Amino acid sequence: MRKGFSAAILFWVAGTALAAGPDISILARTCNNCHGVNGVSAGMSMPSIGGLPRHYLADVMKQWKYDERGAATMNRIVKGLTDDEINGLADYFSRQPWVPSHQPVGSALMKKGKAVIFENCEDCHGATGNDPDEDAPRINGQWAKYMELELEKYREEEFSMPHRKMKKTVRRMKPAELPAAAHYFGAQGK
């Protein structure tokens, strides 16, 4: 009787663990090499992803998976993930704290960047990048180099970037305004 009860408990525990799915933190560790531990990137051309909105992270990864968004490597990396795994990763990283990277900028570039932001970016990302619309990520303290590279992608006709409003806005901007905007947002703290 006692063996039967123990077996039933073991079966219930194993079934519960299987129903809960794989531990997503193990899969999330594969992202550490590029995006840093807990999604805090140490590389200037790699974005921090910890603390970004869940729906934003899931949408972007699915856009790469289904070739709706261009990237150098991410399309190949997320192809092997299921949509459930993508949703799990998005949930995991959205629960991490957002950690802005300290990037000092000269006063002239800050002044120019502030003017560019006011004219082009503030409506969706907020004045300092920490108060975005629902479908936009926070970008205060995001790596300026990364943001500059992303803005260049939006300017390229042959580069697939699905966000229509972002594409129209960036293509309207002058080339010299892109680094000003990126460095202004990159220099913002919390």
Image (cartoon, grey):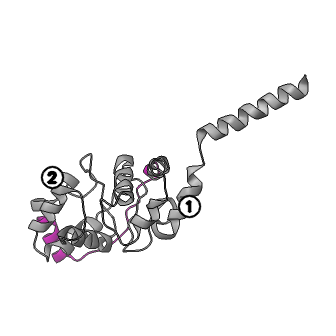
Question: In the image, is 178 to the left or to the right of 76?
Answer: left
Q: Give the range drawn in magenta.
A: 94-116
User: In front of the other: label 2 or label 1?
Assistant: 1
Label 1 element class: helix
Residue highlighted by disc 1: 29
Q: Sequence-wise, which precedes: disc 2 or disc 1?
A: 1
- Residue 140: x and y in percent read 30, 60
Horizontally, residue 145 falls left or right of residue 111, namely: right
Label 2: element kind: helix
Q: Is residue 68 above or below residue 149?
A: above
Residue 20: quarter of image: top right
Disc 1 crowd rating (10 Å Cα; few below 14, some 14-19, many 20+) is some
Q: In the image, is residue 3 above or below residue 34?
A: above
Question: Residue at point 49% right, 48% down?
Answer: 88
Q: Distance between the residues labelled 2 and 1?
A: 35 Å
Q: Which residue in the structure is indicated by mark 2?
A: 123
Let me know if residue 166 appears in the view: yes
